Image: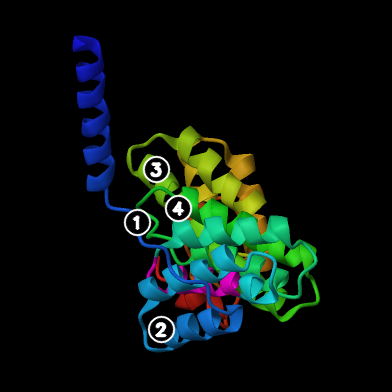
Amino acid sequence: MKQSSLLWVFVCAALLMSCGKDEEPTKPAQPAETLYNDAYSQFLEGKYKDSVTSFEEVERQHPSSEWATNAQIMSAFASYQTQDYDTAVSTLERFTKLYPSNESTPYAYYMIALCYYEQISDVGRDQKVTEQAMQALREVIRRFPESEYARDARVKLDLTQDHLAGKEMEIGRYYLKRDDYLAAVNRFRFVVETYQTTSHVPEALHRLVECYLKLGVRDEAMRYAAVLGHNFPGSVWYRDSYKLLADKKIAATPPAEEPSWWDNIVP
């Protein structure tokens, strides 16, 4: 008797607990087009976070529809607008895996690159995201070389490489100021060899002349001075290198009389 009474108490308690639970409301099913248009209206009104949720609802209710495909791209773009780049990249990477041949796939790859590009910080900080941007931009160019996205990616890639070269120059100058000439040489050579088309190359060549003269390696100093004089004869950096060589009684080709556009570079 006691056992049956105890069992009844447990049953009643379980019933009370189940009655006390609030069931999460589910959104009623709606046509995919209706859901998408509602989400798009939120996006146009600048309610980007709300639109992300609404676009996701399109995919949840109608995962196989064309509206769901478009909703993924718009959801990522809305996340991008709020600077939630991690969410945007995650959504876009999932899209490229699910729809490798979709007409929006080139745009998805471009947006991934743009998410990284927008996060590039000044040269005084860690440049991991800059390297990610460079890799993503190269991927756009590799996959879709004739697209409008590739054209813009090439421009941004040049700027990204210039940024990374600037970081190397900053570190090289740091070593140079502390008379650690070998470490400085490694940084400046890396700029010359890896980032040949950037605006930092003339200064890097001059700094190599400066470092090698400090180390007493005159042949290497003359070699880099010759490269600098041949490629940038009218630059302020070659005039500085020429002066260093002259002070050491080392013959060199005089700088060009007419300054080049490199003279606008601030030392």
What's the mark number on residue 8? none
Element type at mark 3: helix
Indicate the amino acid at tag 4.
Answer: Lys
The residue beneath circle 2 is: 42
Label 3 vs 1, first from the N-terminus: 1
The image position of residue 48, as x and y in percent, is 39, 76
The image position of residue 113, as x and y in percent, is 58, 64
Judged by its main secondary structure, the magenta piece is helix
The image position of residue 167, as x and y in percent, is 45, 53
Which mark lies nearer to you, 4 or 3? Answer: 4
What's the mark number on residue 24? 1
Task: Give the CA separation, mark 4 to mark 3.
Answer: 14 Å
Which mark lies nearer to you, 3 or 1? Answer: 1
172 shown above or below 99: above
Label 4 vs 3, first from the N-terminus: 4
The residue beneath circle 4 is: 167
The residue beneath circle 3 is: 176
Element type at mark 4: helix
Which mark lies nearer to you, 2 or 3? Answer: 2
Residue sitting nearer the eye, 202 or 57: 57
Q: Can residue 214 be seen in this view?
A: yes
Please report the bounds of the magenta region as a residue range.
Answer: 71-83
